[in-house]
Image (tube, rainbow, N blue to C red):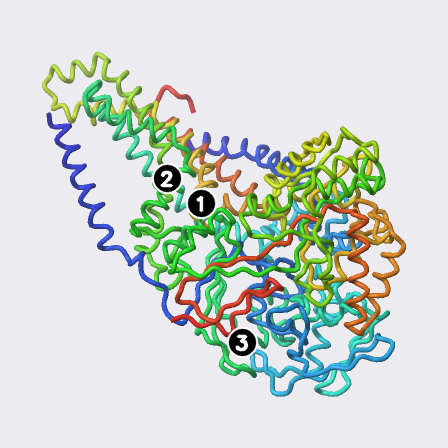
Amino acid sequence: MGSYILKRLVSALPVLLGITVIVFLIMSLIPGDPATAILGSYATPDNVEKLNRDLGLDKPMVTRYFIWLGNMLTGDFGRSFSLNRPVIDEVLERFHATLILAGTSFVLCAVLGILAGTVSAARQYGAADKAITFVVLIGISIPSFFLGMMMILLFAVDLRWLPVSGMYAIYGGGDLPDLIWHLIMPATALAAVATGVVARLSRAAMLEVLRQDYIRTARAKGVPERRVIMGHALRAAMVSIIPVLGLQAGFVLSGAVYIEIVFQWPGIGRMLVDAILKRDLLLVQGGVVFVAACYVLFNIAVDVAQSLLDPRIKT
Amino acid sequence: MPFLNWTRRGLLMAATAALTLPVLAPGAQAQTPPGVLIVGQIAEPKSLDPAADTAVNDFRILVNLYEGLTRYKSGTLEVEPALAESWTISDDGTEYTFKLRPGVTFHDGTPLNAEAVKFNFDRMLDEAHPYHDTGPFPLAFFFGSVDKTEVVDDMTVKFTLSAPYAPFLSNLAYPTGLIVSPEAVKKDGKDFGRAPVGTGPFKFVEWKSNERVVIDKYEDYWGDKAGLQAVVFRPITDANTRVAEMLAGGIDMMVEVPPTSIGEFRTDAYQIFEEAGPHVWFLILNAKDGPFADKKVRQAANYAINKSAIVNDVLEGTATVAAGPTPPAFGWAYNDSLEPYPYDPEKARALLKEAGAEGAKLTFFVTEGGSGMLDPIPMGTAIQADLEAVGFDVEIQTYEWNTFLGEVNPGLSGKADMAEMAWMTNDPDTLPYLALRTEAWPDKGGFNSGYYSNPEVDKLLDAARTETDQAKRAKLYQQMQTIVQDDAPWVFVANWKQNAVATDRVENFELQPSFLLELKDVTKN
C-alpha cells in the first residue's frame, strides 16, 4: 500500500508541472496586461511601459516562467500586486475559508445524500421515496447562486434569522458559534445540488444491492431490517457511492465560486475571479497551482480509500 | 418498521435542533452600535498607501486617514488650503511655495514639516530614492512636471516645475497627493500600505483581509475632531448582496447602489444621496476612416441617439444627459450655455442624406463593464437601436474590459467606427488634454482613439494648461467646449450621478462631487 501511494504521488509531479506551464501560458497570452488593468483610464503607452518595468514584466516570457518556478520551489510565490501582500499568505487564508465552506457542504451532502438515498431505496415507491425524490429533483434543478439569493431574501432580509453575508460578525463575533451562524446558509445552498446527486446515486446503488441473494438470505435468517440495510446493504453499496463522493467533492469546491460571491465568503474561488479580472498574474498562478495540487492529492486519497474498501481493485 | 421509526426520531431531533438554533444564536438582527459607522464598499482595497492606489474604492478610505497640501472645497471641485495654510506661485507659473500648517502631527506622533513633504514627493518621483521601492506608484505622473522639491525652512516647501502646469494645485488635492508619515514608511517599507499613518481625522486600527478595515477617531487631530468613534469598511463585491446587507441592517451606508435597486430604499428608514461627479460617458467616433470622417454624419449620430431615454430608462435616473466633453461638476470651467444635442431622428436622417451616408455600416465596440462604464451592454444596445432607426446598420462587438482597453486605446482605425468610453477626472484639463488633442493620437501616446484634430482646440488646451489665473483658464475651456460640441468627435451621452444610501441614524453626511467619501463630520446615533 505504501509503495502504491508513493507511486501515485511521484506520477502526480508531471501533472503539477504541466499545470504550471498551462496556467502561466494562459495568463501570459490572454489579452490585457496588469499595467493596463491597474492604470485603467490612465494607461498611456509610456505609463504602461514604466509600470510593467516596475512589476518585472518587461523580461521575456520564458525567463519569467523560470524565475517564477524557481522562486516557487523555494516557497516564494511572489507578491500580489492587486492586494499588495505575499501571494502565499492570501492563498492560504482564502483556501482555509473555502475548506471550511466546502468541507461543511461536503459532509452535509454526503450524510444527507446517503441517508436520503438509503431511505428511498428501503421504501421504494413508498411515500417517503416519492417525497425524497421530489425534493432531490428540486435540489438538482435549482442553480446554487439563485437558491443562495432566495435564501438571503427569505432568511436574512425578511425574517432576519440569519446574517446576509461574510464569515464572521463585523463586531463582537469571531468565535465558533459566530462562524457556524454565518455558515448555515452558504453551506446549505452549496450542498443542495450535490446532495441531490448523491441521493439519487445512493438510491440506485442500494436498490441494486437489495436485490442480491445474500440480502434475501439475511432477511430469511431473521436479521432485523435495520441491520440488513445499514450493515449488509449499505456497506456493499458504499463501493459504488465513494467514487461519486469523490466527484462531488470536486464539484462542491468549484461550485463554491458562485456561493462565495453571493455570500461574500472570503474563499479562494472569489479570490481567483477577482485576480483574473485584475490580471493579477502571480496571484492567479499561485492560487491555481495550489488548488490543483490539492485536487490531485484529494483524487489520490479517494483512489486509496476505494482500494481499501474493494479488494478487487489492484494496488 | 424499525428503520422508518429511526428516521422519524431523527427527523424530530433535526427539527428540534433547527427550531432552537435561532434562540441560541448570536443576535443576527442586532443593530449596529451608535458612533460606529459600517460602510459597504464595492471591493477589498488594494493598499492604503495613497501613492500606490488608483481606485476610487480605496480613495474612499484614504481621504479619512490622510490629508494633502490642498483639498477640494466641500461641494465643489475647487481647491482650498489643507495641510498647506497658504501658497504663492511665481509669475512664470513654475515655482509653487507652500507654507505648512503648524502643530500638525501624524498618527505616530511625528510632526508634519517640510522634510516630510519633500520625502513624500521624492519617494514617488525619484527612482534613486531609498524608499522608491515601496511602490510601484502608478499615478506618479500626476506630478510628472515636478522637477524638484526643496525644503526652504522647517515649515516652508518649494516645488519647481519643468513647465507651467495649472492643474498642479488640484492634483495635490487628488488622493495621489495625500501626505504619509515618512517615519512609518521607513519602519514598514513595502508593508506600509497595510499599516497606514497619516494626519487625517481618523487613524488606522486594523485591516482583516476580505473582512474589514477599521479606523478610529484621531484625538489629536488639528481641526474639528471626527463626529464618529470609528468607521468600519466592509468589502461586499456583489451588488445584490450589498443591497441585501443594507436591507437587513448589517451595514449603515452603502455606495454605488445599482440603479434597479434604488427604489427599495425610497422609505423613511433610509436616506438616498446623489451627487453629479466629474464623469462623462461618451462614444468615441472614428474621424479618420469610415462614415464618421464626415462631420455631418458624426452630428447625425448625436441627434439620432435618445439620451434622455438612456439616462431615465436604462440608468433609472442615476445620470444626466451630457452636453459636451466637460462634465458640469467642474462648475468654474463648465460652459453653461451649451445645450445637449436634442433627440431629433428627422434631422439625423436629413444630415445623413446630405452626407450621402444612408445605410452606412458601423462596427461598434461595447464592453461588458469597467470602471465608470455604468451599464454598458444595455446602453450599447439602446444606442444600436436608435442608430438603426435613422438608417445606420450597426454591428456590436463585445469585449471584456481589459481586452476592450487593449483594442480601443491603440486607436479605432481599421477596426471600428465607434466605441464606448467613460472618464472620471479631477481637473478639466485631464480628459480633453489626453483625448482630444492632435498631439494625443494613439501613436503619440495619448487617448485620442478617434483621431479628432482641430488646431483651434489644440491651441486653447495648450494655453489653458499654462494659465494660472483661474478666470482666464475657465474662458479657454469654455471656448474649447463650444468648438468640440459642434465638431462632434464623440457622441456625448451621460454624466453619472454617484449615489449612496444610509439609514436614518446617519447624520451630516454629504456626497462630494470628487466622489471621495469624507466622513469627518458624520455622526450616527
Q: Chain of mark 1?
A: A
Question: Is label 1 in a helix, a strand or a loop?
Answer: helix
Q: CA distance from mark 1 to mark 2?
A: 10 Å
Q: Is residue B57 above or below residue B13?
A: below
Residue designated by label 2: A189
Residue A66 visible in this rendered orientation of the protein: no
Question: Is label 3 in a helix, a strand or a loop?
Answer: loop
Q: Tell me which amino acid carries mark 1.
A: Val
Q: Position of residue B395 (x, y in %)?
A: 70, 31
Q: CA distance from mark 2 to mark 3?
A: 42 Å
Question: Is label 2 in a helix, a strand or a loop?
Answer: helix
Labels 1 & 2 near each other (Cβ < 8 A): yes
10 Å crowding of disc 3: few (<14), some (14-19), many (20+): many
Identify the residue at image location x=17%, y=37%: B10
Identify the residue at image location x=73%, y=57%: B338
**Residue A228, image quadrant:** top left
Residue designated by label 3: B201
Say which of marks 2 and 3 sits in front: 3
